[in-house]
Image: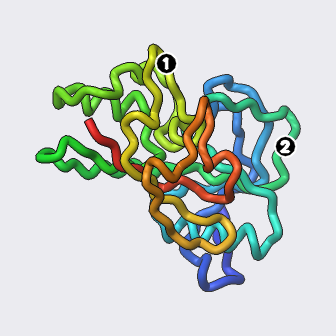
């Protein structure tokens, strides 16, 4: 595995891209081949740079959150895997709300909110995936669903890098689905109520 910097495009000169990264250790199932390219995304600028790289190189791409509900082929992936690692937490104690980077694991969000005595997501303590994955698939268990606590979702359009804020009632939440399963938006952060 070697690291390279993309030097032929000024926009991408700070983006770190690894080549031939083993994917199996990044998933809960622990199977799969290698990704031709791999990068970790922690900021919106990094996400936009990665999407520009995808467009420029005409690469297939996929998002990786917590790595659950995902099985990679043993064959190598010819494109780039974008690992979302945006873990920001902004607390509004007065309103009992938190804005969460969708790379954070759900179990970490549940742990931190229950430590504060905030109720609403306790059912999600056993979910292995990320906040973004839980929103995308409207994860649920024990009578609770992610949509029940979401106030709004901020997403980035994959084709343009444009940011948009969606209110919960605009997200087309349904049984284990949302508009983010069918529309070209990458969930960036979400605001939750407790």
Residue 126's label in the rendered image is none
- Furthest-left residue in view? 94
Q: Give left or right: position of 114 versus 151.
A: left
How far apart are labels 1 and 2 at the CA level?
34 Å
Can residue 55 be seen here? The reply is: yes
- Furthest-top residue in view? 142
- Residue 84 percent coordinates (x, y): 54, 50
Q: Quadrant of the C terminus?
A: top left
Q: Identify the residue under disc 1.
A: 141
Residue depicted at 28% across the width and 46% down the height: 98
Q: Give left or right: position of 57 versus 173.
A: right
Which of labels 1 and 2 is toward the front?
1
Classify mark 1: helix, strand or loop: strand
Can residue 2 be seen here? The reply is: no
Residue 76's label in the rendered image is 2
- Furthest-right residue in view? 75
Question: Alpha-carbon neighbours of circle 2 within 10 Å: few (<14), some, or many (≥20)?
Answer: some
- Residue 192 percent coordinates (x, y): 33, 43
**Looking at the rendering, which quadrant does residue 96 occupy?**
top left
């Amino acid at each position: 595995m070697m690291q390279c910097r993309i030097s032929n495009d000024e926009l991408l000169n700070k983006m770190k891209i690894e080549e031939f990264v083993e994917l199996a250790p990044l998933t809960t199932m622990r199977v799969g081949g290698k990704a031709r390219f791999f990068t970790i995304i922690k900021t919106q600028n990094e996400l936009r740079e990665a999407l520009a790289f995808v467009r420029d190189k005409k690469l297939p791409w996929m998002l990786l959150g917590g790595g659950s509900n995902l099985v990679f082929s043993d064959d190598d992936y010819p494109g780039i895997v974008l690992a979302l690692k945006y873990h920001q937490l902004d607390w509004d104690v007065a309103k009992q709300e938190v804005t969460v980077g969708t790379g954070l694991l759900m179990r970490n969000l549940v742990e931190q909110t229950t430590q504060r005595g905030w109720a609403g997501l306790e059912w999600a303590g056993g979910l292995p995936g990320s906040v973004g994955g839980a929103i995308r698939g409207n994860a649920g268990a024990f009578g609770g669903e992610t949509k029940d606590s979401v106030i709004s979702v901020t997403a980035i359009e994959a084709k343009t890098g444009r940011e948009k804020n969606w209110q919960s009632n605009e997200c087309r939440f349904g049984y284990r689905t949302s508009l983010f399963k069918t529309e070209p938006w990458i969930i960036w952060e979400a605001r939750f109520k407790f």
